[in-house]
Amino acid sequence: MVNCKKPLKIISFDVDGTLVDLEYNDLIWFKEIPELVAKKKKISFERSLKYVYEEYAKLGEHNLNWYDINYWISYFGLEISPNKIFEKYEPQVRIYPEVVPLLEELKKNFILIVITAMPREFLVPKMKKLEKYFKFSFSALSDFKELKNSEIYSKISKALKVRPEQILHIGDHWEFDYLAAQKAGMNAIYLDRSSTTKGNFVVNNLTEIKRVIRDKYNN
Ligand SMILES: [Mg+2]
């Protein structure tokens, strides 16, 4: 980890799997969409789920459309507005228990931001209870029409007018959060909630972030 001369100024968080659990997304991708497809094609839910799952996998997470609910609604020929789906599952948004106490603490000393790969519309229901903590939110897909790659992180640090080394990004995707942010010159922490990865730059729970900031950045 680079010893930064300038103090840490901004703490950046990924959203899905980092601040909120994956249940909300899973309900949309693996329950609602296959249910609608099953109804339309008049097939069983199980068959529909298998079909839908295979279509998602065929496209893959390196394709922008993979993240785009409008793409899938039209791909499967469904007649529903994404907002209807978002609202239906909003009560299922679950924020990890350590998140609010951590943000309360961090907001005293840092500017907090979120950077998500998902379209902005996906952010709205998830951030309702959290948005007051964050000064800025970025959606790689909506704001840049790209995946969370190192260029996106560079553009964001330029937009915020701070050096990348004054930003610490935390997220649960090895490539899109950890490697990409690090490549852009940011400090990066990989959140591995399954606790299979170990290392200086890995935390298994967000509460460890406070210790990492204290030890590594003397903040
Ligand atoms: Mg994530």
Image (cartoon, rainbow, N blue to C red):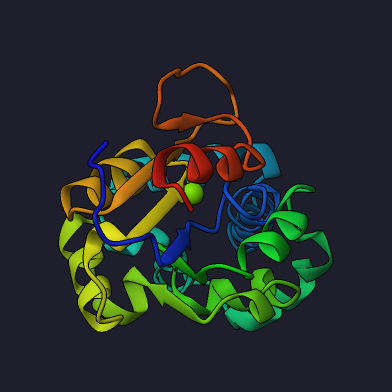
Nearest the camera: 184 or 211?
211
Relative to 79, is 42 above or below?
above
In what quadrant of the picture does the N terminus appear?
A: top left
- Left or right placement of residue 72 versus residue 46 in this view: left
77 relative position to 60: left or right = right
214 w.r.t. 149: above or below: above
Is 84 situated left or right of 217 in this image? right
Q: Residue 106's x, y, as percent? A: 62, 61
Relative image position of residue 64 (x, y in whole percent): 28, 62
Q: Residue at x 65, y 62 (%)?
A: 36
Q: Nearer the viewer, residue 216 or 65?
A: 216
> Taking the image as drawn, is residue 144 in sight?
yes
Query: Residue at image x 63%, y 47%?
Result: 22
Residue at x-position 18% and y-position 53%: 185
- Residue 61 visible from this viewpoint: no
**Residue pictured at 49% horizontal, 46% vertical:** 213
Q: Position of residue 189 (x, y in %)?
A: 41, 41
